[in-house]
Amino acid sequence: MKCAVFGCTNGYKKSAVECSLFTFPTNPSLARKWMKFCRQGKGFNFKNCVICMDHFEREDVVNNLQYELGFANKRILKRDVVPTIYKVQVEKQKITEEQPSDRVRRRENRNILSEAPTSHEGFSKRRLLKNGAVPTLYKDNVEQEIDEATKLENKRIVDELLKQYDADLTKAEELKETTIDISENMDEDIEDFLKNEHTLIENQESQNPLHVSYTQNSGEVSDTEQKLIELKRANDALQKENSQHRIELAAAKRILIGEQRRHRYAVQALSKRLTIVETQKKNYEKKLESIFSKSQIEMIKNGNSVSWSTSDIEAYKVIYTTNSTIYKFLLEKGFPLPSIRLIESSSPSPEISKIIKRVQEQEQDQNQNELQQQDADLYEEEQQQQSPSSLQSLMDHSYSEEIEFEILNE
Ligand SMILES: [Zn+2]
């Protein structure tokens, strides 16, 4: 079996360890990509064809390491991988020297064309074809050429990177050796060593953009933390104040409740007293009503402006006519009585007049009876005093008798 890529001779001579061969994929679109890569022209049938591993990136093989260490029987490609490395550059030279194919010639022509100044660069107005030039490229092929160019570039970069890697590796190994040397003297230099390493790390960190952003963020974080602490402190102060207020409030509440209780007791006591006073008042009023008339009670309550009923006036007229002196005395004392003017101006009803007359007659009778009685008494006394007693006492008695007589006549 030989590699199907145009110009590649791998497959005949090399063993599988040196160069594995991969059969075409069963996926038709992927197989077409592989086929294009082979550049075998029209009529190329990829059945039973292979492509050697030189055209694939090392990463395209899943199990390179296992294979190389003998853990796998064959190399296996990753899924959907396409060959990218067109490794006929070296062989191409040989082929060109031996017998330059049409294809190689074509490429050489193209290279010359691409190196020549183009129209838009200002050297000529039109593009001119060489004598005997024949159109050879389909569009697909152009794309393929461009792909190839980028692939070659990629390869170059990879080679450079590998070189760099090798160099780094050797450097690292050298460093390892020197580190081992240092480690023997570490007891002496340990402090300096650690210090240097520390500063080195610090420098690396400060140069690292990630580190910068981290320190910026950490600055913000510490600012926020500071603010948070301040807010917490303010909150604590407010809470303390709040609890103080709550205590004060509770004390005020307690005082208020005490006051309320005291007031309630006071109100209860007052209302008790009020009922007592009201009953007393009622009793007084009852008593007053039993003694005085309505008009009189009104007068006691309100003063002088009272409209007297005729029955009142007539009743008190009796008292007035009987003894005007006593009536005047009572009026002056503030007894609730109709004024003398009112009584004098009122004409007594015949019934009352009769009563008055009768009262006056009775009084006269009484007076006469009294006089008679007095006379009788005097007579008796005279009889008793006719016994021999002192003259003086007799004289005195007659004198007093005379005076008494005078008074009675009046
Ligand atoms: Zn090959």
Image (cartoon, helix red, strand yellow):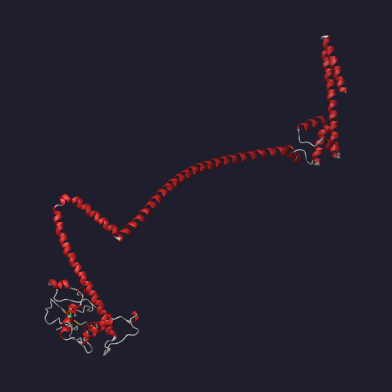
State which quarter of the image contains the N terminus: bottom left
Percent coordinates x, y for residue 61 in the rendering:
19, 75
Q: In the figure, is residue 252 to the left or right of 23? A: right
Query: Residue 172 is drawn in which quadrant?
Result: bottom left
Q: Nearer the viewer, residue 104 or 210?
A: 104
Query: Residue 218 is drawn in which quadrant?
Result: bottom left
User: From the viewer's perspective, is residue 236 above or below residue 293?
Assistant: below
User: From the viewer's perspective, is residue 118 above or below residue 399?
Assistant: below
Q: Nearer the viewer, residue 144 or 105?
A: 105
Query: Residue 85 is drawn in which quadrant?
Result: bottom left
Q: In the figure, is residue 284 to the left or right of 117? A: right
| Res 269 seen here | yes
| Res 386 seen here | no
Q: In the figure, is residue 398 to the left or right of 296? A: right
Q: In the figure, is residue 190 to the left or right of 408? A: left
Percent coordinates x, y for residue 134 in the rendering:
27, 89
Percent coordinates x, y for residue 234 in the rendering:
42, 49
Percent coordinates x, y for residue 336 in the rendering:
76, 36
Q: Nearer the viewer, residue 213 or 408?
A: 213
Residue at position x 86%, y 22% in the image: 408
Residue at position x 19%, y 67% in the image: 165
Ligand 1 is found in which quarter of the picture? bottom left
User: From the viewer's perspective, is residue 21 above or below residue 239?
Assistant: below
